[in-house]
Image (tube, grey):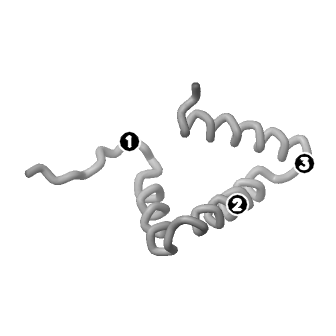
Amino acid sequence: MAGAYELARQHLDSAMAAAAAADIDPDRFAKAMLSELLQRFRQRRSAEDIRSEVAFELENLDGDQDFPFMRP
């Protein structure tokens, strides 16, 4: 059984392919998907919580950084 990230990746790949088949610009489609995802998040989480989550993802876009953490 696929985990959450693998399942999301599979669905996103499928959705991007459907958008391409419909001649929809990939960046426009990605922006629409992001908007819809944020609206779904908003049903369960506060705006500040969503901002914090998105800020964390943006700060770590390159993927090559170590995550800072505190040791006791």
Disc 2 designates what residue? Answer: 31
In percent of the image, x 44 and y 47: which residue is there? Answer: 62
Decide which of tag 3 and tag 2 comes sooner along the chain. 3
Question: Which label is found at residue 9?
Answer: none
Question: Which label is found at residue 23?
Answer: 3
Residue extending furthest bottom?
47
Disc 1 designates what residue? Answer: 64
For disc 3, the neighbor class at 10 Å (few under 14, some 14 to 19, many from 20) is few
Name the amino acid, label 1. Asp
The image quadrant of residue 20 is: top right
For disc 2, the neighbor class at 10 Å (few under 14, some 14 to 19, many from 20) is few
Foreground mark, 2 or 1, reads: 2
Q: Position of residue 34 (x, y in %)?
A: 66, 59
Decide which of tag 3 and tag 1 comes sooner along the chain. 3
- From the viewer's perspective, tell me whether residue 5 is left or right of residue 55: right
In percent of the image, x 45 and y 74: which residue is there? Answer: 48
Name the amino acid, label 2. Lys
Name the amino acid, label 3. Asp
Q: Secondary structure at mark 1?
A: loop
Q: Secondary structure at mark 3?
A: loop
Q: Position of residue 70 (x, y in %)?
A: 16, 53
How far apart marks 3 and 1 lie (CA) works out to 34 Å
1 and 5: which one is in front?
A: 1
Tag 3 and tag 2, C-beta contact below 8 Å: no
